[in-house]
Image (spheres, coloured by chain):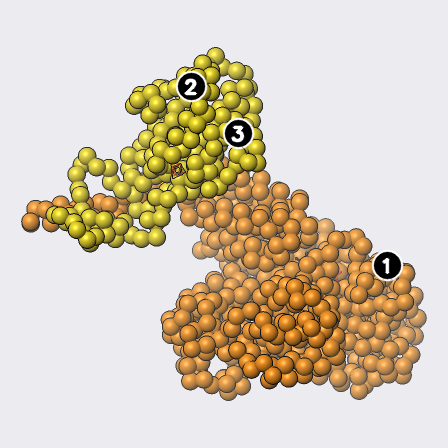
Chain colours: A orange, B yellow
Amino acid sequence: MPQSSSLERVLTRISARYRDEPYQLLQMLRAVQASYSHVPQSAMQFLARHLGVPLSQVQGVVEFYAFLHETPRGRYDVRFSDNITDQMLGSRGLCERLCQHLELTPGQPRADGKVTVDYTSCTGMSDQGPAALVNGLAVTRLDVGRIDEMADLIDAGIALEAWPRDWFAVRDHIRRSGPMLDLQMAPGAALEAAVARGASSTLAELARSGLRGRGGAGYLTAHKWRFCLEAPGMERFIVCNADEGEPGTFKDRVLLTRYADALFEGMALAGFVVGAREGFLYLRGEYEYLLPHLESVLERRREEGLLGGNLLGSRVGFDISIHLGAGAYICGEESALIESLEGKRGQARVRPPFPAIRGYADKPTVVNNVQTFIQAAQISAMGSAWFAEQGTEKSRGTVLLSISGDVARRGVYEYPFGVTVKEVLADCGAGAVQAIQIGGPSGHLIGAADFERRIAFEDLPTTGSLMVFDWSRDVVGVVQNFSRFFQHESCGFCTPCRVGTTVLRQLIDKVASGHASAADLDELEACGMVTRSLSHCGLGQTAPNPVLDGLKRFRPVLEAKLLGGTDGPGFDLDAELSEARKISDESLKEGQHG
Amino acid sequence: MNAPTEQPARLTVATCSLAGCFGCHMSFLDVDERIVELAQLVTFDRSPLTDVKHCSERVDVGLIEGGLCNVENVEVLREFRASCRYLVAVGSCAITGGVPAVRNKFTLESCLREAYIDAPGIDNPHIPCDPEIPLLLNKVRPIHEVVRVDYVLPGCPPPAEAFWELLTALIAGREPELAYEHRRFD
Ligand SMILES: Cc1cc2nc3c(=O)[nH]c(=O)nc-3n(C[C@H](O)[C@H](O)[C@H](O)COP(=O)(O)O)c2cc1C
Ligand code: SF4
Ligand code: SF4
């Protein structure tokens, strides 16, 4: 526990760094966590007083986010990414090995306070797992050698800066590029084209392109911008959703690394079109390692007059600041994201009103995915025809797939919309494929019968995640992993999702353990339907997808686990009597001797 | 699960106690004089109340008190399931394993050692082993882990009113509905 006067000095400094602004509470708490390995109660009380927010809100925020803790974590805080793709690459065994070396239990700090080892949801490195975060920084391609060395480094108390640099190397793995990834756009080109064209013509150009959002729902981007533009109010905001929490997705990571200029340009473009002067990039906490790079691009653009008060010789003023998340998948949902930007718990709002009408600070706000902004900038620079050339009638342009799992070449692939699953599988070197999770856990689990289908909003929509499972994998294990993910990430606000995700997880665990009966499969289905139809936000509405798809497309695999047959649960009486038989055998033997 | 729709002439009801303390049966008897009314509406089949040792071929409602701690419990439960149209898990022990399941934190061997060998003041310390004594299960189990269960009466024990509601509802051919105050978990 830090000394109270020194704690207050540090907190005052942290708070000042964020202009004592209550909306920055989450950012402040992240800083406190980084300084003290937890957020002490006294720090919460101080910040509550200092900022004039209720203590319950501060406490609520600390409890909500996975990367904030009320009790101390170790000074080295290691979190293994627990996505199925990491597990398939041996992450669980590596985590256990590290725990053995360091003599600790996962999730609990070692008695000397030096280290905590734990699991976390997908860290966005499915193409180069098994991955982990060490004190928030991404470590990739873990193997036995790295784990053994890591244990030594931790025991010797070596600072992170002195750890091997290549552990922190994140590769881009662009395997197939198309017009989007190939386009070399000079910084400022999109903005200049837009200013030359005028705001309303730019919006019309965007509408002609048919660009749909790349973050999930596939809403027409021009419509969203128009709603925001036409919403009453003096102030407007632009928000980029770089939460990329969907397990198995990593295309935004690559875009943030390589196309940050185009992204910021797209945000400034949106600002120009709707009349906003301020933008936020909401970056998932797992990508904290990208922060210095992104800040430097922002700074350079300010100097180049492509951002800030001086943007394009001050014809338009627009600036961007970066907010870090703190480990909550739900904060990818646009209204939860806005709550989080406002320094609160990431709890989805009632929609409508949509953010375009009432978003950040209750003002009209455009929220778009990273890729959507980049494509909007490209359309402004190149024209709608360039963009609309590719793709299908309803899904214009190209799609970026983040491919991982049982394939020869994991990475990012760009295809025109309308490409069949089969073509994609052939390109990435997938062998005998049993199943694919397309669009992440909230998307769909499909089998061979669907491999002729097309990837497009009108057939198989996707946020880009494509995880491939060959015949050596247990589909029930896959469904279990995703069901655990949703149970863990449910924000707990509404009962159908809070309870539903727990019941679904327990039932699928029961199926996996062999104790389920056919009645449990019916129960799974019923519970899935309730969760889907009654949940408050998109998380709960899609959480049952892995289970429901498993039942729909892989029923025989699930049924094969029902040891009890169709009616009763599986119960192996002989196995249950093993200890008693052993004891009575020994007791008999002793009786004979005695 | 649908309640019986047409009213049968007389429902048959069986009860038994597995790894329980008979507290649930005692609570059932707290329906007091209404037991006379009940006896006019149903026929009691296998039950400690009748001392009938096996279920008839077809029983309408089987009430099970207690969880499963040994092989005999499993056999009795399976016989009940096979005979009963509706099987009811009565009380915490049947529903969750209850007090007997406290031993699940330990291995069976360490429990037996503690009871028959290591405890102070034991004469002739040895673990009993006789074909007459049913073998114990590795862990105490709630009954739904072994058979399908149609209804549950929660509580330790459930109040007499809960038994009354369950049986009168099934007799009348409607779904039982436990009032809030009769739905308890301790
Ligand atoms: C649980 C949940 C998580 C989401 N996560 C993300 C995400 O990580 N990134 C993203 O761009 N959109 C995510 N979305 C979709 C957003 O709510 C929103 O639709 C999107 O950011 C809009 O941008 P777009 O129109 O450019 O697609 C998520 C939605 C839900 C329900
Ligand atoms: S659906 Fe789930 S994540 Fe969404 S508000 Fe309800 S509990 Fe929270
Ligand atoms: S539930 Fe309570 S009253 Fe009933 S058998 Fe178990 S311990 Fe006894």
The residue lying furthest to the front in this view is: B33
The residue lying furthest to the top in this view is: B9
Secondary structure under badge 3?
loop
Q: Chain of mark 3?
A: B
Quarter of the figure with residue B94: top left
The label shown at residue A474 is none
Q: Chain of mark 1?
A: A
Whole-number angstrom distance, CA of label 2 to CA of label 1: 68 Å
Nearer the N terminus, badge 3 or badge 2?
Answer: 3
Q: Name the residue rendered at 68%, 71% in the picture.
A: A48
Asked whether, in this view, residue A212 is left or right of residue A122, the answer is right
Report the amino acid beneath label 2. Answer: Thr
Along the viewing direction, whichever of A464 and A149 lies nearer the viewer? A149
The label shown at residue B1 is 3
Asked whether, in this view, residue A218 is left or right of residue A250, the answer is right
Residue B113 picture location, percent across and down: 22, 51
Q: Name the residue rendered at 75%, 53% in the picture.
A: A350
Secondary structure under badge 2?
strand
